[in-house]
């Protein structure tokens, strides 16, 4: 640990308290959100899930609309073949040699590996203990394919929670990223997402995960003369394939 | 602390005013930012925008009013998530903490995602001095690191550099000469930086928001460098001002709607990254060690003054800079420290000391455009006025005093305006004094200060032959009967 | 909206109008009387104290403020032909005197009855057409305090558009400050001038023959710039335009 540098926390917090002229303890005027009982958060989350499932069609339509405005290439696949075919054609067009993907259920619904291999590409699974990794450096991949944990219609955002089987960099290192989205993962807005993740933390604490990423279209910069350049450190091309058949 | 040049405002701003190229460029590009913001607000509807601003303001007010409580909660949760929390009362302590982490872990290459606090601390030269190479990975920050300058703008640090200047810089500093277009320059930076991004052992970030309840650090970025910094290196350090806390995850929705729109007119940035401590044992990747450094560095002085506390509500979007007619003329470097523009004119004097930054609160026409565009409705002009009073009349924390001339002038003015009779006498003298200079109802040149500073570039009205009160007495009062 | 036959209003003419532009005061009185307002002029008035307040001399400003509060205590309404001085009285007096047991309540009372000239006409009197006529193109510069402290966006425009023969032409970046800013204009003349240059450019571009505003101070700045550049556009207070043709 770091010893002997910095200000001890009690002292620091006491000095903040003194600056505020406040006594220790919770806020005098409580903040509604923070004094809410867990049961009430759970109730709200349940109501949210019900609303989402009732409005699923509309939310998926809105997701597709907004995501394409935010720079995603959106494809609404009508079936497994259509989804696989889309990724196949994309890989063909890009002359893809190396593909990395995560380990997620969605690849059971959409088996991509054989199709990609038939193109002559090698598919690497970015997970520990995976044999195919070998001496492969994921930084050399030219296509990254992942599922998502949520997709937010309001902002056209794919939300990924890295964990076992889901690396932080599968969607970051390759210049092209494909995200597979199930309609059941679609949320209406940011409020839904944060409510659900808040509840996950209240339930599971440290086990709720170490990281959460929102991805909205390609990486970009406008730092030189305010001129937009698509493709900075992250992918320059992002595809959202919506698995639009009852998943 | 990074070098303070706030006392050089007059000289620095005069230089920018004389630079015709920069003048025309500044006006244009600030207008672009401003226009993008206005468009994004129109899209979401001004009513909705107003609602979000109010929400944002109330969340900030509540959190800052109870900051000790939420800092305690934050510390507890980050620790529960497996991270380490450090507190630094000033820049020196913050540097020492980073230094200790880098040295005890033998860290050699630090990739940095944009952090204003690290600018406050002068972190880069310090890291170099202890043998850890700091690399700014945001393109704008990278450019100014190569140029050995400070940020010109909160969200567009290198906006003052033309593509020709960047091209020259890249030729000279990273061996990529003769790049013609901006895309090629961004590409060159990407290639050079990629090598650093995948091999660094230390990641350093700032924080846009800290969520107390879940111990989460939130970063909002567009380039993807923030994702590298939080994913690749084995040690991750986030350095942040203590004011960035919000109570709950659910509060983030409001700020994620506000910040990108106010900053660049984007509906959302490409990436919003949430870090909950180090990687968990089962994770594929992520930092093995996580440190959060919470910095005061003068902020408790803002906190302690109820009239200035709201300066800490700032979410660093830069909208007040873009809209400020003074910033548009003098640019970012004139302000002489990390935070330029209207919000800088409030924050810098308190953080670096009022004595050496008297120009900052004064160099404003108090037009209030900043308050209008602020996504948190921070009343910057009122705070500038408060600081002016501290400069002129002194304050509990500072011993500044107005200049002798200013004090005499103000007493004289007060005395004059306390008596209509005295005012009338002064008027008679004034009519005599202006006689040799006036041409009709105007004066083209008056050699006596402060009037000379007016007539250098503007015609000045002469005292009217009769004051209104005389006209009233002689004619108007009677006519109303 | 009040019955105009009963309205009495005290004029706070502002020190600038008193000493430099009495014709603006005359126009204000003329327009108000034309609407049936009984106008008085409390003779002890001088300056609202804003220059001192803005320079950070709050104690000196408060001394002048107390004079104003006493002088206008009996008034039913106070009308001010300046968005800036009206903000001082409406917004900043209550702040200056917030802890003063005697003048705090007086400041609050004044705050409720003080109106900038155009706001008084539209909001209190319910007037949109004062019966003026003015041939020509007029551009309107919304002065900052009027716009942002008093939030008067529409009132001056409404009144202008009621003037017969007047063509209201748009002014580019109208909401941007002209660079006056009180003592700012002489403390930082370079910046003030650069801001003024933009304003003058936009006035010229608008094609207007007259630029108007509700503050004699901003107009002094704009006029000073127009004249120095030899541009033949007039800069006149809104009250003067509303008094045209009378």
Image (tube, grey):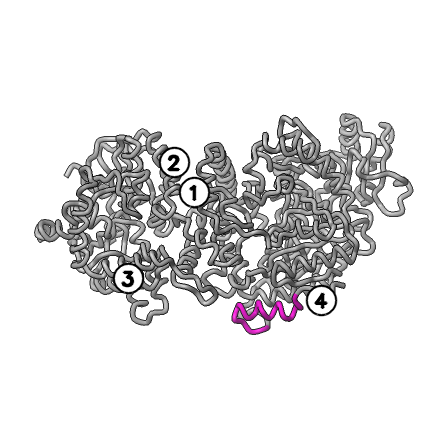
Mark whose residue sits in front, 2 or 4: 4
On residue C198, the disc is: 2
Q: Which residues are magenta?
A: A7-24
Q: Name the chain letter of the residue that bears numbered label 1.
A: B
Q: CA distance from mark 3 to mark 2?
A: 34 Å
Q: Pointer 2 and pointer 1: residues touching (CB < 8 Å)? A: yes
Q: Can you tell which quarter of the image residue B150 is in?
A: top right
Mark whose residue sits in front, 4 or 1: 4
Q: Nearer the viewer, residue B415 or B323?
A: B415
**Residue at 61%, 48% in the rendered image:** A189
Q: Are marks 4 and 3 on the same chain?
A: no
Tell whether A97 sits left or right of B330: right
On residue A4, the disc is: 4
Pointer 3 residue: C65
Q: Can you tell which quarter of the image residue A101 is in?
A: top right
Q: CA distance from mark 4 to mark 1?
A: 47 Å
């Amino acid at each position: 640990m770091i010893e002997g540098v910095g200000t001890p926390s009690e002292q620091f917090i006491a000095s903040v308290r003194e600056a505020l002229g406040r006594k220790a303890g919770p806020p005098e005027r409580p903040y509604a959100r923070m004094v809410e009982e867990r049961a009430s958060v759970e109730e709200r989350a349940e109501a949210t899930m019900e609303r989402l499932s009732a409005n699923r069609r509309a939310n998926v339509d809105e997701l597709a609309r907004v995501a394409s405005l935010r720079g995603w290439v959106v494809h609404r696949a009508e079936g497994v073949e259509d989804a696989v075919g889309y990724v196949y054609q994309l890989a063909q067009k890009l002359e893809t040699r190396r593909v990395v993907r995560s380990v997620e259920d969605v690849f059971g619904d959409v088996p991509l590996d054989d199709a990609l291999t038939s193109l002559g590409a090698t598919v690497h699974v970015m997970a520990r203990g995976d044999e195919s990794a070998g001496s492969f450096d994921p930084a050399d991949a030219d296509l990254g394919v992942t599922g998502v944990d949520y997709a937010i219609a309001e902002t056209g955002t794919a939300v990924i929670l890295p964990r076992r089987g889901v690396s932080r960099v599968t969607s970051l290192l390759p210049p092209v990223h494909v995200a597979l989205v199930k309609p059941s993962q679609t949320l209406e807005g940011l409020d839904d997402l944060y409510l659900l993740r808040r509840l996950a933390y209240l339930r599971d604490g440290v086990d709720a995960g170490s990281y959460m990423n929102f991805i909205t279209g390609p990486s970009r910069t406008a730092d030189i003369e305010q001129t937009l350049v698509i493709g900075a450190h992250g992918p320059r091309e992002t595809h959202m394939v919506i698995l639009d058949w009852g998943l | 602390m990074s070098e303070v040049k706030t006392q050089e405002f007059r000289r620095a701003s005069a230089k920018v005013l004389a630079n015709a190229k920069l003048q025309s460029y500044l006006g244009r590009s600030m207008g672009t930012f401003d226009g993008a913001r206005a468009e994004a607000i129109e899209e979401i509807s001004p009513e909705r925008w107003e609602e979000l601003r109010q929400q944002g303001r109330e969340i900030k007010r509540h959190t800052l009013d109870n900051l000790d409580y939420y800092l305690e909660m934050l510390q507890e949760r980050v620790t529960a998530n497996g991270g380490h929390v450090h507190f630094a009362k000033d820049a020196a302590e913050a540097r020492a903490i980073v230094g200790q982490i880098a040295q005890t872990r033998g860290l050699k290459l630090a990739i940095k995602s944009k952090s204003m606090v690290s600018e406050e601390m002068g972190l880069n030269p310090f890291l170099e001095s202890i043998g850890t190479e700091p690399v700014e990975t945001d393109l704008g920050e990278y450019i100014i690191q190569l140029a050995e300058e400070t940020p010109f703008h909160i969200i567009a640090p290198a906006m003052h550099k033309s593509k020709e200047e960047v091209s020259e810089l890249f030729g000279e500093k990273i061996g990529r000469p003769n790049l013609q277009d901006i895309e090629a320059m961004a590409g060159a930076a990407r290639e050079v930086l990629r090598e650093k991004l995948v091999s660094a052992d230390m990641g350093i970030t700032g924080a846009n928001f800290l969520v107390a309840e879940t111990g989460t650090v939130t970063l909002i970025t567009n380039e993807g460098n923030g994702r590298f910094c939080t994913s690749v290196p084995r040690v991750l350090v986030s350095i942040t001002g203590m004011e960035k806390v919000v109570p709950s995850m659910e509060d983030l929705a409001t700020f994620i709607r506000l910040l990108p729109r106010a900053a660049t007119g984007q509906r959302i940035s490409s990436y919003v990254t949430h870090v909950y401590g180090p990687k968990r044992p089962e994770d594929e990747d992520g930092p093995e060690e996580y440190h959060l450094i919470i910095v005061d560095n003068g902020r408790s002085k803002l906190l302690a003054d109820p009239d200035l506390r709201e300066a800490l509500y700032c979410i660093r979007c830069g909208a007040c800079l873009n809209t400020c007619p003074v910033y548009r003329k003098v640019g970012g470097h004139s302000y002489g420290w990390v935070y330029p523009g209207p919000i800088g004119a409030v924050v810098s004097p308190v953080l670096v000391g009022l004595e050496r930054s008297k120009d900052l609160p004064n160099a404003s026409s108090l037009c209030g455009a900043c308050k209008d565009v602020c996504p948190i409705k921070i009343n910057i002009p009122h705070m500038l006025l408060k600081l002016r009073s501290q400069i002129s009349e002194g304050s509990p924390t500072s011993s500044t005093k107005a200049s002798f001339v200013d004090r005499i002038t103000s007493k004289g003015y007060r005395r004059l305006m306390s008596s209509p009779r005295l005012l009338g006498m002064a008027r008679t003298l004034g009519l005599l004094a202006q006689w040799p200079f006036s041409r009709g109802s105007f004066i083209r040149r008056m050699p006596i200060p402060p009037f000379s500073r007016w007539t250098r570039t503007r015609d000045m009205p002469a005292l009217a032959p009769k004051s209104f009160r005389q006209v009233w007495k002689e004619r108007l009062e009677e006519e109303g009967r | 909206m009040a019955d105009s036959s009963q309205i009495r209003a005290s004029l706070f003419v502002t020190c600038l109008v008193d000493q430099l532009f009495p014709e603006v005061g005359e126009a204000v009185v003329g327009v108000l009387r034309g609407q049936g307002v009984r106008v008085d002029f409390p003779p002890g008035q001088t300056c609202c104290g804003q220059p001192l307040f803005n320079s950070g001399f709050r104690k000196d400003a408060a001394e002048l403020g107390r004079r104003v509060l006493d002088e206008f205590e009996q008034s039913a309404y106070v009308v001010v032909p300046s968005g800036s001085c009206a903000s001082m009285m409406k917004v900043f007096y209550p702040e200056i005197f917030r802890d003063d047991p005697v003048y705090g309540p007086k400041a609050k009372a004044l705050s409720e009855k003080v109106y900038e000239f155009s706001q008084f006409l539209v909001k209190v009197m319910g007037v949109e057409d004062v019966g003026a006529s003015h041939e020509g193109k007029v551009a309107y510069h919304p002065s900052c305090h009027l716009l942002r402290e008093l939030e008067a966006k529409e009132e001056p425009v409404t009144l202008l558009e009621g003037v017969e023969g007047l063509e209201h032409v748009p002014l580019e970046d109208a909401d941007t400050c002209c660079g006056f800013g009180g003592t700012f204009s002489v403390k930082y003349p370079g910046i003030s001038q650069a801001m003024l240059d933009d304003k003058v450019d936009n006035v010229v571009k608008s094609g207007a023959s007259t630029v108007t505003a509700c503050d004699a101070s901003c107009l002094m700045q704009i006029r000073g710039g127009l004249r120095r550049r030899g541009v033949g556009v007039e800069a006149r207070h809104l009250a003067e335009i509303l008094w045209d043709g009378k």
